[in-house]
Image (cartoon, rainbow, N blue to C red):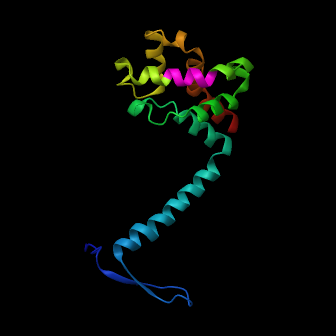
Amino acid sequence: MSLVDMEDSITKRGHKRHGDQIITNLRYYRVDIFNQVVDLIIQEMGNRFSEVSTELLGCIACLDPRNSFVQFNIDRLTRLADLDPKDFLQSDYLYLPQQLSNFIANVRYDSQFYAITNLGSLAREMVRTDKHSVFPLIYRMIELALVLPVATASVEC
């Protein structure tokens, strides 16, 4: 089997207006083919998941404890509470942004939370360190994040 030299040039057929174009194999495979495949994957994902499910997963990802909660986003997490309003009181929405802010400042500098890589472990560590009592709204959000994807998938089937 022969390997393609990625630095070799090829002629890419163009439209009548633009004519043919000389490009490298590397550009052809990296840009032209790769982008088409990514577009197909995005389209397929859009067909399989509802907009609400996609938004839900995006919000839940903000609770990911890996890399010192690098994806943490207060606005998106507030939106997560909006997606399931029956679990939050109106007054909870007043305290939620401040509790989220205090929570992230607290756990980012707590060495007991450094090695946590998933939501289940985060919930267990919050109970072990009694942070579930200090940050009850955050703990409720984590519980919802552990349950909602399964409940949503069950309803959509």
Which residue: 63% across, 46% down?
49
| 142 or 93: nearer the viewer | 93
The single residue placed furthest to the left in the displayed view is 2
| Percent x, y of residue 101 | 53, 25
Q: Residue 140, located in which quarter of the rendered image? A: top right
Q: Give the vertical position of 70 relative to 96 (above or below).
A: below
| Percent x, y of residue 96 | 62, 22
Which residue: 50% across, 60% down?
38
Q: Residue 110, located in which quarter of the rendered image? A: top left
| Percent x, y of residue 132 | 52, 13
Q: Is residue 26 left or right of residue 157?
A: left
Give the position of the C terminus as an image quadrant: top right
Give the position of the N terminus as an image quadrant: bottom left
Which residue: 43% across, 21% down?
107
Q: Give the vertical position of 34 relative to 80 (above or below).
A: below
Q: Give the vertical position of 33 relative to 153 (above or below).
A: below
123 falls in the magenta region:
no
Bounds of the magenta segment: 96-103
Q: Is residue 141 left or right of residue 110?
A: right
Majority secondary structure in the magenta region: helix
Tell me if I can see residue 143 in this picture: no
